[in-house]
Image (cartoon, rainbow, N blue to C red):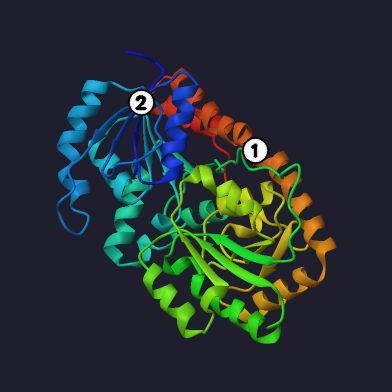
Amino acid sequence: MNPRRICFLANLGALHAVRWANHFHQKGYEVHVISLRDGDGLREGIHVYRLREDLPFKLDYFRGVRQVRELVADIRPSIVHAHYASGYGTLGRLVGFHPYIVSVWGSDIYEFPHRSPLHKWLLRRNLAAADYLCSTSLDMAREAKQYTSKPTLITPFGVDCDEFSIPETSEESNEFVIGTVRSMEKSYGIDCLLKAFKLLVNEHSDWPIKLVIVGGGTLEREYKELALKLGLGELVHFAGKVPHGRVPDYLRSFSVFAALSDNESFGVAILEASSCGIPVVVSKVGGLPEVVVDGETGLMVPPDDEVAAAKCFEKLYLTPGLRDRLGRAGRQRVKQRYEWSQTARIMENLYENVIATNTSESAVHSAQKSAAAAV
């Protein structure tokens, strides 16, 4: 068995799952990914196994257990790592391979257990089955502690600061662009952003201001209709979903980045904006206070408060020096704490520890104590 052979149970439609797979392949690991979704951007040489997906109510995760068991038996990995504690965590638990890592991502902790007592029970079982738990933020790790007493390793998503950078030269423009890169889903507060922008337009109709929304999702049509209803017309540009490689160019065209989420576990898009030297206005929810220092790298507002958000936009329009100071401090903080090679090394250390450790029950608990940052 190749000791550097790992198997991910993950949604390949999620950018960060693809990034993890690519990173470990680049580091010389033999990477296998079992997924219910197709994805783009995987490096050549990564082994992908696409599960069938045609049953309702997430029953695919249960139906796929036998197939995944057979695949894992053939792959003979050193580690199985499930990304998301709900669906893929259920699949991993039922497969029963060890050593087994579970990464919680957000909705699996903040939303899934609140749907019913059954969902809460299922999450507890899934977390209990893991030998190691990972979380992208301290806030989410604290949330997970409601369902498990196991220590949690904090593994933040990182940013490539060379790709997401401040341009050496930029064209002078009088236009003030408020922008966001978000999925068009309820939790990301696009409706609040539109209403805040409407307040700004009403107060300053003569200002050269514009709102750019990058991303797709199930509520895209609804938000476009809301923009028309608010009378924003050509002042709002819906760019749609774009390849991740184009995101830096969009970010560098923004004067301000907005993330008015109702709840959010971490906020890597905010860090990408900060890495480009863009000041940010974000809701004070979930893990966002971990990535934004209020008044230093961005401005924070209460969730669902379009009035407070509009006032922040107004303040940043009127004080270009503040925009510049927040943007440059934000990039510096990302480089110090969230550069991709630094954050990825945390997971690399965990993998190396697991591979080097005997997987007997006593050794697993010993490895947890040395590898996991307890919360």
Above or below for 257 versus 82:
below
- What SS does tag 2 mark? loop
Residue 118: where, in percent of width, then height?
27, 62
Residue identified by numbered label 2 = 46
Residue 373: where, in percent of width, then height?
58, 39
Q: Quadrant of the N terminus?
A: top left
- What SS does tag 1 mark? loop
For the point 71% across and 58% down, which residue is it? Answer: 279
Specify which label sits upstream in the sequence, 1 or 2.
2
Above or below for 301 versus 142:
below
For the point 30% across and 50% down, which residue is it? Answer: 87
Above or below for 8 versus 150:
above
Q: For the residues marked 1 and 2, what is the alpha-carbon distance in whole angstroms?
A: 24 Å
Marks 1/2 in contact by CB < 8 Å: the verdict is no
Q: Amino acid at mark 1?
A: Glu
For the point 69% across and 41% down, which residue is it? Answer: 337
Q: Is residue 218 left or right of residue 167?
A: left
Residue 12: where, in percent of width, then height?
35, 41
Q: Is residue 295 left or right of residue 58?
A: right
Q: Is residue 130 left or right of residue 287?
A: left
Residue identified by numbered label 1 = 339
